């Protein structure tokens, strides 16, 4: 068996490695720490088997030492353990515990006996007297959670240049412990814990949930942080009134149920938020958002818990007039007309600048027939639905031909009253059976 150092290509003697830094660059002396030595030109040795002609990489042929700068009375040399080649630019090692406070040069010896030195590459901070910093990032202290909500627990600890030896997270209500978890450690100065659980039903009206994070560092110093949130009963949705409104939004509805709370409550219609204007424990007053036509799930979200009424509200599209036939007629009115459009219902009302269509006949969702009321000039033909509302943009005009329409001549301005369309000349509507 022969041992040889790997040489780079080219002519001339092999060059020693160069050192750039050591990580960590400083630490307390409380415990042994993993370290990375970074540089250039780390060349491992190879073990050759002359019998078989095979070769194996020898990754443990390096040595590293921390040398006090300036020297200490006892010499101040502290060998690193477990020095191992990882790549041409990184060596792994372990810094021993108990290195006195001060600055240290890093000296590395490669398998060929070449030495590289990095002045003051490491600083020992001596004993650790500062406890770790502990945080509970979630849930937020002072907030609220309702039964059934998913609790996202996020806790962390940071010991600066020290080492976290233990991080424990305990989740409890007033009456019981829900979770006690030892968090995973990486052997470094930080540790973190992230997990979820479901909020239970409160045992009383003033029940609370507490998340406590407790951290211990390598020197045995302990610190903790706590987050406390109110624990609420889950919301219950029973119904929505009215149960339908315009796709344009703006319908004010009352949502009945139980366990509603002012503050941590929102209402969404298929994920679109409504505007809450009033909250009581048993009802919510909400203004609907704009939404496409059709049924929508109504969901109440209270402190992370949800209750849903599938198809609890129906959005109705406002009717729209697309064209009319004919587009003009005499001022006296009573011209038979066909209104063509969309989203018509038997309740749809057609008006000519506010005057209703005479003898309206609903044919289908796209067609209504009737008689033109008397009028003058050009008037907009609009469609209105008591639930779906009205679209006034892009209206279709009807042109009245001739003079002003006939009307009463004996009514003074004080007793004229609201305009009323006169009855058809024959006393009834077509098909009404009137004489």
Image: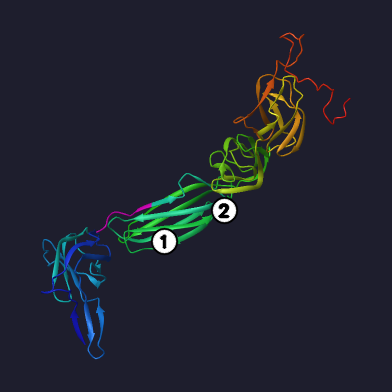
Q: Nearer the viewer, residue 100 or 61?
A: 61
Left/right of residue 33 with respect to residue 422 in the rendered view: left
Dot 1: element: loop
Q: Does the stretch in magenta take in 85?
A: no
Q: Position of residue 330 (x, y in %)?
A: 73, 21
Quick one: quadrant of the N terminus?
A: bottom left
Which stretch did the figure color magenta?
A: 127-134
- Depth check: 391 or 212 in front? 391
Q: Secondary structure at mark 2?
A: loop
**Image point (44%, 57%), residue name:** 194
Picture quarter containing residue 422? Answer: top right
Q: Is residue 23 above or below residue 388?
A: below
Residue 254 location, x and y as percent?
65, 37
The residue beneath circle 1 is 183
Above or below, comparing residue 197 to residue 304 in the picture: below
Q: Residue at x 22, y 80 (%)?
A: 46
């Amino acid at each position: 068996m022969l041992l040889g150092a790997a040489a780079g290509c080219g002519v001339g003697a092999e060059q020693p490695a160069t050192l750039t830094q050591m990580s960590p660059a400083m630490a307390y002396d409380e415990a042994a720490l993993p370290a990375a030595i970074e540089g250039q030109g780390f060349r491992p040795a190879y073990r050759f088997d002359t019998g078989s002609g095979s070769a194996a990489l020898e990754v443990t042929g390096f040595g590293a030492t921390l040398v006090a700068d300036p020297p200490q009375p006892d010499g101040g040399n502290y060998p690193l353990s477990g020095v191992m080649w990882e790549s041409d630019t990184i060596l792994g090692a372990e810094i021993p515990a108990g290195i006195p406070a001060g600055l240290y040069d890093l000296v590395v010896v490669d398998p060929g006996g070449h030495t590289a030195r990095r002045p003051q590459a490491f600083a020992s901070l001596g004993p650790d007297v500062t406890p770790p910093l502990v945080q509970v990032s979630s849930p937020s202290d002072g907030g609220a959670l309702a039964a059934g909500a998913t609790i996202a627990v996020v806790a962390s600890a940071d010991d600066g240049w020290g080492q976290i030896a233990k991080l424990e997270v305990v989740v409890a209500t007033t009456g019981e412990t829900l979770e006690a978890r030892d968090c995973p450690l990486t052997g470094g100065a930080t540790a973190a814990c992230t997990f979820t659980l479901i909020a239970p039903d409160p045992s009383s009206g003033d029940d609370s949930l507490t998340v406590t994070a407790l951290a211990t560092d390598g020197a045995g110093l302990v610190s903790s942080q706590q987050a406390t949130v109110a624990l609420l009963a889950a919301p219950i949705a029973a119904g929505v009134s009215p149960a339908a409104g315009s796709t344009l939004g703006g319908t004010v509805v009352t949502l009945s149920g139980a366990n509603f709370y002012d503050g941590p409550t929102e209402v969404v219609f298929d994920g679109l938020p409504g505007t809450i204007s009033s909250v009581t424990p048993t009802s919510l007053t909400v203004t609907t958002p704009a939404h496409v036509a059709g049924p929508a799930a109504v969901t109440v979200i209270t402190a992370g818990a949800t209750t849903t009424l599938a198809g609890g509200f129906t959005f109705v599209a406002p009717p729209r007039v697309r064209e009319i036939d004919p587009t003009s007629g005499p001022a006296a009115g009573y011209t038979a007309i066909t209104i063509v459009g969309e989203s018509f219902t038997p309740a749809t009302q057609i008006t000519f600048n506010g005057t209703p269509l005479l003898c309206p006949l609903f044919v289908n969702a796209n067609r209504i027939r009737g008689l033109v009321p008397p009028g003058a000039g050009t008037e907009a033909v609009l469609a209105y639905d008591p639930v779906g509302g009205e679209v006034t943009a892009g209206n279709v005009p009807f042109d009245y031909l001739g003079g002003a329409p006939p009307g009463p001549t004996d009514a003074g301005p004080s007793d004229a009253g609201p305009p009323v369309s006169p009855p058809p000349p024959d006393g009834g509507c077509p098909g009404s059976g009137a004489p």
